[in-house]
Amino acid sequence: MGFFDWVLKKFFSIKSKKVLEEKQKQLPPKVSEVSKKEKEEVELNDFQKLIKNLEENRGEVIKHQEEGKPKMYYGDEISILEFQGEKFGFDQESLDFYNEEFNKKGYTIIKVPSKNGSYLARENNETGKISYFHISLMEKEIEDFCFENKCDRKEVVVHHKKFNPSINMRKDLQVMTENEHNKLHNR
């Protein structure tokens, strides 16, 4: 749902109900329904106010929409995704994965703050489940690691070798057990 649709939905579901409730209170106690014509007049008047407000603030509405969208800057070897004040680095392989597998319809790209920066992630629009990019990128390596080390998937993490969660290249990521990861970070 776009911003404009969201505003219309919120405006009519909240504002119109309040106006209609106030009109109902003004009616005699035995008459509890507002006529269809009155409802249409209220909705039309509210809609005209909304359109006027949107037209006056069009630049701000567009700016607000654009600020929430990731912007990609392409380089020869490294590409940068700028999103909500954070920059995430990709090589060609991880960029292809981002474009073809990760940034799909039905998901919202988000950033998840940590003490060393932010992780790039996506949120499923229906379930709210969050998937981290670096883990999705390394899924095959995680499966191989679990098979080779006879360990459960829940015991495994993907470590950023440079301790920077904004670097999302396979060569800078390492699969390890959670215990190994804790030892590494607690040195």
Image (cartoon, helix red, strand yellow):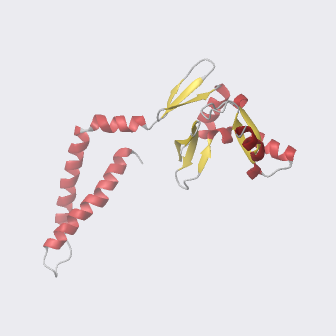
In the rendering, at what x and y percent does residue 176 appear?
Answer: 77, 41
Q: Nearer the viewer, residue 30 or 137?
A: 137
On the image, the x and y values in percent for residue 145 come to 81, 42
Taking the image as drawn, is residue 139 in sight? no
> Where does the image place residue 103, in percent across and percent down from the top left?
57, 39
| Quadrant placement of the C terminus | top right
Question: Image height check: is 22 above or below 54?
Answer: below
- The answer to whether residue 87 is left or right of residue 22 is right
Closer to the camera in the image, 41 or 168? 168
Q: Is residue 18 left or right of residue 130?
A: left
Q: Please tell me which residue lies in front, 124 or 106.
A: 124
Residue at coordinates 23% horizontally, 45% vertically from top-left? Answer: 51
Task: Give how far across and how far down residue 166 sits, in percent.
Answer: 59, 33
Q: Is residue 161 visible?
A: yes
The structure residue drawn at horizontal position 30% and vertical position 36%, both measured from the top left corner, is 60
In the image: residue 179, left or right of residue 84: right
Residue 138 located left or right of residue 31: right
